[in-house]
Image (cartoon, helix red, strand yellow):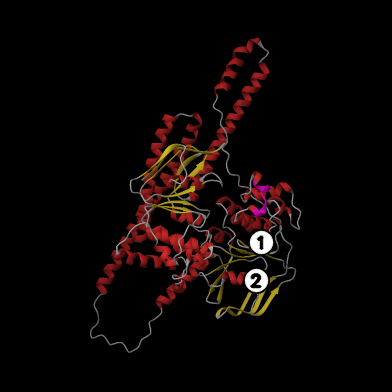
């Protein structure tokens, strides 16, 4: 369907691709990963034909329709939300147009739009809502392959979960760039890593990819260590016996061995540094509280008589549908949005820090990134500041860029760095992972897990939520409900409530008629129960067998990947081709077993 064959691309002296290849088949679901600036978005533009290929070729199946969502806002005409969602280069019949209109409305509502929004001009929307229209337009067009570059950046949690489920069921191929680990894990069955200017494909989700890569790195490190020890022994022998004529043949032999040796180099991996951020001063037991708080926007009441309290050390996430009032509540807590009535009470010695990706006006446009990062009350060592900046994608000379020339995403990252380098004891965070890559998100999660203060946050990133939140506040129609547990506990409670509503007796408007005769299904029910038990036993036996087979295949694949790493060092390309064929065969069988297991689980 889509073949990337030995492509080469460079920008001056910076090589992006050198002999990179990738085969994408029908309905493949692939995540493209690699450090920031490695060339992931460039690959998308080359596939689309927007950026020329300097060597090799990209072959697309005749008639293949590609749909692309860039990171930045896609161009629009002057139409309404619904008109732009329906805009397409294809001519449609009236009946198809009608079906597409219904599909467009369903998609728009899934992404958080209301019925009254359909007639709004897109030009009146914010950049984030424009991106949602762009997503809707792509989904309605139903391309053969979707190329999505950070598609979750402008979605809230509920819209993201709807979008994720829609993509999971969609009958199309997928190439995905995303920092959202949970989103990637839910959608892909293979990961393509951009490394050493080439593309390496690994079966499974991102968690499986990380485990395999860690094993490969361990094997390579072991081979590197052994070789370095061997080199040291040879060099020591040469230096010791070089002057002895009787040892001359052995010395020359070892010199030749060193000259012929293929030197193993450790790959320049993206450095994942565990950062211990400064800790804040301790505050009282109550961090912040609202009493009888009310807030309206015109005639729309958001909160009325709200009571809320946050205690020291809590890590609380706000969840709820779009427009429920999560950001409004966070702004009230931060003191940046006044209430109509009520009290906002700060606990003893509480300092509030508020972060939102749109709150970057506090940066001095004339200072460099490094100057801004060091301009805090707390004095941090320069090396530590540089390390933190590098972790949040300000690497090398980028720290000398003026804040005024930074993009919106770069300004958001810099504002987040400043907050973490001098943290208050109450952090209020609105979508802190937007504009970060996967490794920066991981660093942020580890830092916030170690944070000794209080955190209240809104996020669509399930990895962050599941890793961090110990309390969930559900915001719905001006009412808030606290769940003392993580997000998985909240989801279980929501499911229980749904089941309780479904099991509740229906209201009876008139007495039910008495049956004239006792229905006879005792034998049938018993027979059905017996058959059900037999079916369940068969399914469970089959499931255990499939799980065992999958574990065996994963072990076989890990062994083959390890063999590839050692053969790669020896540059034996014929052997590499044989191993590559074996890897693809095992990958194919593994994917088939996983699909079989998934279908069986759905049956169960």
Q: Residue under circle 2?
A: 333
Tell which of 164 and 139 is nearer to you.
Answer: 139
Left or right placement of residue 325 versus residue 134 in this view: right
Q: Start and end of the magenta stretch? A: 398-404
Tell which of 81 and 224 is nearer to you.
Answer: 81
Mark 2 Cα within 10 Å, few/some/many (few <14, many 20+)?
many
Q: In the rendering, which numbered label is found on residue 543?
A: none
Quarter occupied by residue 139? bottom left
The stretch drawn in magenta includes residue 153: no
Mark 1 Cα within 10 Å, few/some/many (few <14, many 20+)?
few
Residue at the front extreme? 78
Above or below for 20 versus 48: above
Residue at 33%, 67% (x, y): give it.
98
Q: Residue under circle 1?
A: 361
Left or right placement of residue 192 versus residue 483 in this view: left
Left or right placement of residue 413 versus residue 195 in this view: right
Q: Position of residue 442 (x, y in %)?
A: 58, 53
Quarter occupied by the N terminus = top left
């Amino acid at each position: 369907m889509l073949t990337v064959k030995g492509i080469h691309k460079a920008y001056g002296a910076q090589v992006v691709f050198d002999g990179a290849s990738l085969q994408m088949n029908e309905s493949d679901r692939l995540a493209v990963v690699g450090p920031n600036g490695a060339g992931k978005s460039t690959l998308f533009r080359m596939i689309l034909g927007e950026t020329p290929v300097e060597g090799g070729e990209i072959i697309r199946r005749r008639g293949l329709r590609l749909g692309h969502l860039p990171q930045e806002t896609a161009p629009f005409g002057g139409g309404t939300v619904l008109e732009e969602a329906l805009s397409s280069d294809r001519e449609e019949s009236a009946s198809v147009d009608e079906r597409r209109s219904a599909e467009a409305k369903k998609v728009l509502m899934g992404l958080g739009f209301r019925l009254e929004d359909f007639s709004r001009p897109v030009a009146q929307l914010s950049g984030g809502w424009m991106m949602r229209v762009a997503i809707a337009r792509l989904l309605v067009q139903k391309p053969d392959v979707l190329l999505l570059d950070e598609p979750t950046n402008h979605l809230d949690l509920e819209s993201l979960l709807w979008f994720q489920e829609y993509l999971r069921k969609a009958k199309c191929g997928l190439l995905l760039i995303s920092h959202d680990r949970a989103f990637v894990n839910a959608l892909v069955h293979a990961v393509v890593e951009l490394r050493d200017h080439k593309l390496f494909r690994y079966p499974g989700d991102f968690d499986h990819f990380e485990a395999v890569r860690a094993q490969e790195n361990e094997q390579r490190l072991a081979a590197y260590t052994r070789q370095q020890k061997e080199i040291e022994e040879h060099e020591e022998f040469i230096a010791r016996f070089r002057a002895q004529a009787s040892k001359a043949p052995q010395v020359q032999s070892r010199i030749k061995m060193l000259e012929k040796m293929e030197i193993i180099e450790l790959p320049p991996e993206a450095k994942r540094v565990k950062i211990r951020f400064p800790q804040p001063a301790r505050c009282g037991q109550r961090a912040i509280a609202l009493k009888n708080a009310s807030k309206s926007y015109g005639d729309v009441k958001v909160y009325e008589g709200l009571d809320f309290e946050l205690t020291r050390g809590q890590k609380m996430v706000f969840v709820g549908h779009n427009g429920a009032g999560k950001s409004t509540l966070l702004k009230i807590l931060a003191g940046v949005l006044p209430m109509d009535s009520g009290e906002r009470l700060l606990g003893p010695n509480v300092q509030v820090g508020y972060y939102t990706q749109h709150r970057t006006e506090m940066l001095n446009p004339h200072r460099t990134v490094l100057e801004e990062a060091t301009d805090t009350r707390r004095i941090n060592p320069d090396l530590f500041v540089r390390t933190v900046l590098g972790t949040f994608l300000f690497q090398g000379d980028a720290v000398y860029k003026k804040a005024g020339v930074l993009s919106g995403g770069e300004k958001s990252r810099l504002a987040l760095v400043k907050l973490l380098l001098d943290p208050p004891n109450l952090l209020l965070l609105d979508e802190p992972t937007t504009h970060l890559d996967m490794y920066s998100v991981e660093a942020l999660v580890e830092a916030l897990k170690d944070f000794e203060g209080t955190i209240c946050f809104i996020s669509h990133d399930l990895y962050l939520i599941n890793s961090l939140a110990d309390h969930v506040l559900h915001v719905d129609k001006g009412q808030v409900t606290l769940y003392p547990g993580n997000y998985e506990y909240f989801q279980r409670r929501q499911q229980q409530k749904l089941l309780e509503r479904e099991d509740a007796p229906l209201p009876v408007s008139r007495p039910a008629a008495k049956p004239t005769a006792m229905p006879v299904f005792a034998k049938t029910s018993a027979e059905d129960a017996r058959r059900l038990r037999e079916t369940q036993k068969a399914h469970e036996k089959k499931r255990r067998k499939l799980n065992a087979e999958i574990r065996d295949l994963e072990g076989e694949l890990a062994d083959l990947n390890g063999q590839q790493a050692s053969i790669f060092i020896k540059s034996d390309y014929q052997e590499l081709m044989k191993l590559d064929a074996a890897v693809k065969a095992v990958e194919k069988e593994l994917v088939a077993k996983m699909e079989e297991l998934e279908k069986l689980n759905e049956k169960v």
